[in-house]
Amino acid sequence: MSPEVVAHRGASAALPEHTLAAYELAIAEGADALECDVRLTRDEQLVCVHDRTVSRTSDGRGAVGALTLAELRALDFGSWHGGDPAPVLTFAELAGLAADHGTPLFVETKHPVRTGGLVETRLAQELARHSLDVHMMSFSALAVRRFKALAPAVPTVWLLDRLWPQRLPEWADLPGPGVSLLRRSPGRGRGAYCWTVDTAPDIDLCRERGVRHLATNHPARTRKILAAD
Ligand code: G3P
Ligand code: CA
């Protein structure tokens, strides 16, 4: 079976990552699912931002957690990429888009220790308000374990970059290897979520290994490569 194409931060090679336009393009390009990172603002709202600070992806400065949602809304998250100005995307807005299109989500939480589990709590609350096909993910075992206790019905992905444990712990439903870990782990990958897969040889490797969910910055190109063979 061909892997499902997961648009990593939206169609993020073409348009600024984590913007509504990037996710709308990913859906238009036929992505099967959408990936996003979530962080908490100072007033405990979930927003889709990858980095700890806003400096790389906006015209502002400072940590996401030190800014209120209103302060983030005053920033431009589009122009840095050479595109149109774009506002910050809240997780509620992305969830609304996904629900409208029936598109599954893969949601990654960052830095659980700093927020003391609050980001996982807020995510579980937010997910309870929507009817979504969703996976929760994190590199942090603590974050995934905490989330599983809060929302046992939501499948979880434990993101892996250096080591691939022989057995997954009970709180993790799927392994989430980076593609370089997949390359150096012969015979493994069946059913996994693999990131970030942007070249034809890596797409072929994912297919050979039976990877189920393939996260890419290029959903249209990936879909074309998968359809060609
Ligand atoms: O999909 C998982 C992948 O996004 C993890 O790395 O840094 O892009 O969030 P990062
Ligand atoms: Ca991510």
Image (cartoon, rainbow, N blue to C red):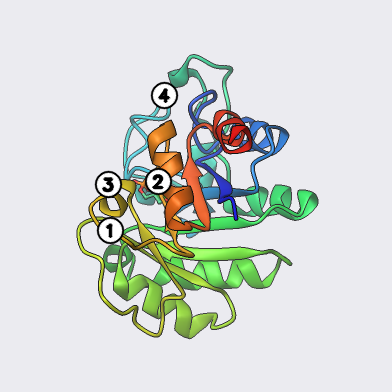
Question: Looking at the image, is mark 2 or mark 4 nearer the viewer?
Answer: 2
Identify residue type, mark 2.
Leu
Determine the residue located farthest toward the front in the rendered image.
Answer: 229
Give the distance between the C-alpha atoms of the residues marked 1 and 3, in whole angstroms: 11 Å
Residue under pointer 2:
205
Residue at left 52%, top 68%?
122
- Residue 90 pos. (x, y %): 58, 48
- Residue 16 pos. (x, y %): 51, 27
Check disc 1 and report its element: helix, strand or loop: loop
The quadrant holding residue 51 is top left
The residue carrying pointer 3 sits among few (fewer than 14), some (14 to 19) or many (20 or more) residues within 10 Å by Cα, namely some
Question: Looking at the image, is mark 1 or mark 3 nearer the viewer?
Answer: 1
Residue under pointer 4:
59
Q: Quadrant of the N terminus?
A: bottom right
Give the distance between the C-alpha atoms of the residues marked 3 and 2, in whole angstroms: 11 Å
Residue under pointer 1:
186
The disc, 2 or 4, on the residue closer to the chain's N-terminal end is: 4
The disc, 2 or 1, on the residue closer to the chain's N-terminal end is: 1
Identify residue type, mark 1.
Pro
Give the distance between the C-alpha atoms of the residues marked 2 and 1, in whole angstroms: 10 Å
Identify residue type, mark 4.
Asp
The residue carrying pointer 2 sits among few (fewer than 14), some (14 to 19) or many (20 or more) residues within 10 Å by Cα, namely some
